Image (tube, coloured by chain):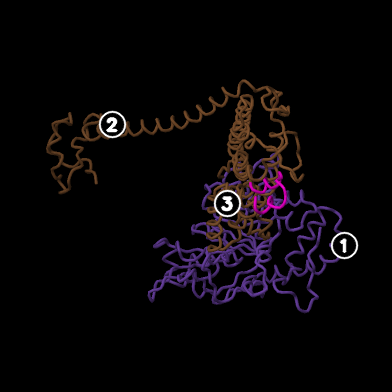
Chain colours: A brown, B purple
């Protein structure tokens, strides 16, 4: 407790320095004084406060350095990919097939781009509705015990290594059949599901309970409330969650190597064709394994395309979430 | 517009469908006037139903709610114990009392808004037009369809002003003449003139008082029988409060209003009848009880109970 102003004081020194020794004395009310001996002294830091400011500045500095390092790593990665990809990047790189023979220069990665787009689109079409339904069930309908059990299951599913997911789908859809774009989509959907469900759940929890209450009080049934009030309010957040999951899934490699990697280098958009669909991550993997300098260059180019897509998707998600930010009344 | 089934001739009306004829008759009449194509409904329903409304007004003391020995608890703690009272048609009934005495619990019990509160348990009966609203087979969505509620904090949907009002009618199959219905509700809530030029702007851009009137408009857009107001003006400034209070006086011609308020002056200004709740701490328990219930004038000038007079004169609470 600080000294009450106007308490009788033993010293009238106004510099504040000469008064320091009196700091630990008890004041007129028998309480230990706070060390601030002269409340009328100049308001510059002294003693303890000066030391604390120094420590504070040190900690602040190291935190800033850590943040800069994180940004720096991103910058270095982007730069090194971009500089190595520069030699192959052109419009043709996005629209042409790779050359037919190893050791040939030129060509593009159009099949991989189309294939990745199809695979990820199908995966999203599976995972997004399911993820949203799971999240709605958790926040709007499930009881406490079920809720925590399902949430735990989702977190565990999120933690399953993607190679394991790939193996599972390999055993389920590929063994005895063929590799296919759909098998890849299915694997990616399993990876996306917990991401979308958990992120959507968090957004749904942000929808003010007072809105649900208001809707309830209007005699409208629960599912119409969910459809008409809860989902639209959370729309921006759900879109953001989905875009982030898409960005994550687009770069997944391990499950695709198992499910859709023996592909011909020709554009195909049919995930159910009974043939593997070309895709960017696997293409990068294969091209960088082969002994072909032009293949290396194309692998870097493909890496740059993938990186750009993911960065743009993340930025887009950010813009979305800001535009749809739920402003309180 | 789909007119509600008149079940006056039905010897055994379905549960929670009592006197639909009476309270929804004006609705049909107005829709007929507005849309001009409800002639059949007008001739078919208005004759008898209009008489019923008139007789109800003349009697004026018909009970809408008959609460009998109501006790509510959450888990192991009692919120209110042994409340018995009647709430009458087309009157404003105020519930006053100190914090924590169960006013809001009581109010929310009237349209089953407490059902979703964990540990909620209810004893006794709440008869609405003679039907127990907690009886098995009663659908709480239907209960709330008849008994609307406005909350302490304005809670408009993050939609346009128009959609805020139109949302519930759309979902309750009252789509015919939706524009007129929205206008009527907004006029009813004394908000029309302020928002008629920006109906499609986001409701969150309105001021607090406007938002609360929008919430009232939203509630009356579905033409309920009863309006429950839970401290509707406590988050508003005096001018907005005054407009809400004025609004209540016009609304009571068509709705039965129950209002919970912390503000005794407000109760004295707006309410026809006042119920005073207090916290009963005798016998080691802590529960809200109904201390006294009567005409507002009597409650504030000649209360029977010492606790009431202490409270209304500002000696505690």
* x and y, in percent, of residue B312 in the image: 45, 63
Chain letter for the residue marked with disc 1 in the picture: B
Q: Is residue B136 magenta?
A: no
Say which quarter of the image contains residue B116: bottom right
> What residue sits right under mark 3 in the picture?
A201
Are discs 2 and 1 located on one and the same chain?
A: no
> What residue sits right under mark 1 in the picture?
B40
Kind of element beneath mark 1: helix
> What residue sits right under mark 2 in the picture?
A54
Image quarter of the N terminus of chain B: bottom right
Q: Earlier in the sequence, mark 3 or mark 2?
A: 2
Q: Is residue A278 left or right of residue B38?
A: left
Residue range in magenta is A170-187
CB-based contact (under 8 Å), mark 2 and mark 1: no
Q: Is residue A174 magenta?
A: yes
| Structural distance between the alpha carbons of marks 3 and 1 | 50 Å
**Image point (65%, 23%), residue name:** A89
Q: Nearer the viewer, mark 2 or mark 1?
A: 2
* x and y, in percent, of residue A144 in the image: 53, 62
| Structural distance between the alpha carbons of marks 2 and 1 | 85 Å
**Relative depth, front residue between B312 and A126:** A126
* x and y, in percent, of residue B113 in the image: 59, 63
Q: Does the magenta stretch mainly form a helix, a strand or a loop? A: helix
Disc 1 crowd, CA 10 A, few/some/many (<14, 14-19, 20+): few
**Relative depth, front residue between A173 and A124:** A173
Say which quarter of the image contains residue B317: bottom left
Chain letter for the residue marked with disc 3 in the picture: A
Kind of element beneath mark 3: helix
| Structural distance between the alpha carbons of marks 3 and 2 | 43 Å
């Amino acid at each position: 407790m600080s000294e009450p102003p106007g308490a009788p004081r033993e010293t009238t020194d106004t510099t504040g320095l000469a008064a320091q020794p009196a700091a630990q004395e008890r004041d007129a009310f028998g309480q230990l004084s706070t060390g601030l001996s002269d409340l009328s002294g100049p308001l510059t830091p002294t003693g303890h406060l000066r030391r604390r400011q120094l420590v504070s500045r040190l900690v602040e500095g190291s935190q800033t350095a850590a943040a800069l390092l994180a940004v720096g790593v991103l910058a270095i990665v982007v730069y090194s990919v971009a500089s190595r990809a520069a030699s192959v990047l052109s419009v043709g790189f996005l629209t042409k097939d790779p050359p037919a023979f190893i050791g040939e220069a030129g060509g593009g990665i159009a099949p991989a781009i189309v294939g990745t787009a199809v695979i990820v689109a199908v995966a999203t079409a599976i995972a997004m509705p399911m993820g949203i339904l799971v999240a709605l069930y958790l926040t709007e309908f499930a009881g406490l015990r079920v809720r925590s059990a399902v949430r735990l299951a989702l977190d565990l599913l999120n933690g399953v290594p993607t190679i394991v997911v790939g193996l599972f789908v390999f055993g389920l859809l590929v063994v005895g059949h063929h590799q296919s774009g759909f098998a890849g989509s299915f694997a990616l959907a399993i990876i996306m599901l917990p991401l979308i469900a958990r992120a959507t759940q968090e957004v749904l929890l942000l929808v003010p309970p007072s809105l649900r209450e208001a809707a309830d009080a209007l005699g409208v049934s629960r599912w119409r409330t969910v459809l008409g009030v809860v989902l639209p309010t959370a729309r921006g957040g759900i879109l953001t969650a989905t875009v982030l999951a898409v960005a994550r899934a687009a770069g997944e490699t391990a499950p695709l190597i198992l499910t859709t990697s023996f592909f011909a280098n020709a554009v195909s958009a049919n995930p159910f064709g009974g043939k593997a669909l070309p895709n960017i991550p696997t293409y990068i993997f294969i091209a960088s394994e082969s002994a072909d300098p032009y293949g290396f260059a194309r692998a870097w180019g493909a890496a740059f395309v993938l990186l750009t897509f993911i960065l743009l998707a993340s930025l887009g998600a950010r813009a979305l979430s800001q535009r749809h930010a739920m402003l309180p009344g | 517009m789909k007119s509600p089934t008149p079940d006056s001739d039905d010897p055994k009306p379905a549960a929670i469908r009592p006197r639909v004829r009476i309270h929804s008759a004006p609705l049909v009449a107005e829709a007929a006037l507005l849309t001009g194509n409800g002639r059949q409904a007008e001739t078919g329903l208005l004759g008898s139903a209009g008489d019923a409304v008139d007789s109800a007004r003349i009697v004026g003391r018909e009970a809408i709610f008959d609460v009998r020995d109501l006790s509510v608890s959450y888990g192991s703690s009692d919120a209110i114990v042994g409340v018995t009272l009647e709430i009458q048609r087309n009157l404003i009934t105020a519930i006053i009392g100190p914090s924590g005495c169960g006013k809001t619990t009581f109010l929310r019990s009237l349209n089953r808004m407490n059902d979703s509160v964990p540990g909620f348990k209810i004893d006794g009966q709440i008869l609405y037009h003679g039907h127990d609203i907690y009886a098995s087979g009663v659908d709480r969505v239907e209960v709330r369809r008849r008994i609307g509620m406005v909350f302490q904090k304005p809670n408009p949907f993050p939609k346009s002003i128009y959609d805020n009002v139109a949302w519930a009618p759309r979902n309750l199959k009252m789509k015919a003449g939706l524009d007129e219905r929205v206008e009527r509700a907004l006029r009813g809530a004394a908000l029309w003139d302020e928002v008629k030029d920006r109906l499609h702007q986001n409701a969150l851009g309105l001021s607090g008082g406007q938002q609360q009137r929008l919430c009232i408009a939203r509630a009356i857009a579905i033409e309920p029988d009863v309006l429950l107001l839970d401290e509707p003006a406590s988050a508003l400034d005096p001018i907005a409060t005054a407009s809400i209070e004025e609004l209540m006086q016009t609304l009571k011609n068509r709705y039965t209003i129950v209002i919970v308020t912390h503000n005794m002056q407000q109760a004295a200004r707006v309410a026809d009848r006042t119920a005073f709740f207090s916290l009963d701490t005798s016998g080691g328990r802590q529960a809200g009880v109904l201390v006294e219930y009567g005409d507002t004038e009597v409650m504030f000038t000649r209360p029977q109970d010492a606790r009431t007079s202490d409270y209304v004169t500002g000696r505690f609470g």
